[in-house]
Image (tube, rainbow, N blue to C red):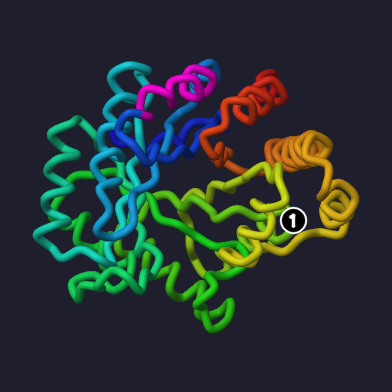
Amino acid sequence: MKLTNIYDKKDKTLSFEIFPPKKDAELDNIDETLEVLSELKPDFISVTFGAGGSANKNRTIALANKIKTKYKIEPVVHLTCLHYDKNEIDSFAREMKAEGIDNILALRGDRNPKVVEKNDFKHSTDLIEYLDKEYDFGLFGACYPECHPESINKVDELKNLKKKVDAGAKVLLSQLFFDNNNFFNFCEDCKIADIDVPIIPGVMPVINAAQIKRMVSLCRAAFPERFQKIIDRYEDNKEALFDAGMSYALSQIIDLLVSDIPGIHLYTMNNPMVARRICEGIKNIV
């Protein structure tokens, strides 16, 4: 089932992201999180892909198959391309089709100095164009409300995003952000740039200090003053920061849901406690 047409319906969609455990033996342990997530009957669950050369790619497909067969929820498999050639991408695509997986979030992938980059796909747009031509997948793309760290400026970012959509991306899932105004402004800029596909905001509850520092370094997401005050006050209090971070994320989600957006995509970090708190907080408004 291709999911890129679900945004034609009037109801707002709800989706989650999880990542494969590092060890095969831990695949069974993720069921606790999946049990919680399935209670809300999400429209799909996306599964992240391992770095180039990682055996994690096989766990990605195995986990996606479990989501589809055991929980009866459609998976969206992340597929990176910077470290793979066409033969390897073909192999992944055929394996996904054999497992009944119909939807892909096509990504370039992070640069890894320990893994050799291939020459067939330099950008996610190249991968999207190839998959759209050679296979019948529902194709999702990524977008960055506050610009990709490698972008020259916002104008260049929007030009590249337009190319991605023209290449075949039917839905855009956003990188996390903490200021909803940045997302709303980004959506307006996309309209001006004639990017007319559904843009789904991605939200991640930040619940510990180490996670906060990692997010700052990786995606350069801006912290609103209100959220910075939470960090300053509770950084050394693990329990208080968890509660405050969850409350902030829930207020962010509610503000998005009452606005003119087609759905919400939640980064769960495989934490069943986070998933449960989110589900309890929004179960009556989605």
Left or right for 98, reference 34? left
**Magenta residues (range):** 26-37
Quarter of the image where one finds residue 247: top right
Q: Is residue 121 visible?
A: yes
Q: Is residue 81 left or right of residue 275?
A: left
- Percent x, y of residue 270: 51, 34
Please tell me which residue is depicted at 54% across the width and 53% down the height of the picture: 174
Picture residue at 54% right of the left edge, 32% below the top: 14
User: Looking at the image, which is closer to me, 109 or 208?
Assistant: 208
Q: Does residue 99 appear left or right of residue 78 in this picture?
A: left
- Locate the N terminus and report the quarter of the image it occupies: top left
Residue 259 visible in the snapshot: no
106 in relation to 48, above or below: below
Task: Please name the residue that numbered disc 1 is placed on.
Answer: 179
> Which residue occupies 74% across, 36% down?
246
Q: Amino acid at mark 1?
A: Asp
Q: Position of residue 195 (x, y in %)?
A: 48, 62
User: What is the secondary structure assignment of the residue under circle 1?
Assistant: loop
Q: Does residue 159 appear to the left or right of 140 in the view shown?
A: right
Residue 220 shown in magenta: no
Provide the major secondary structure of the magenta segment.
helix
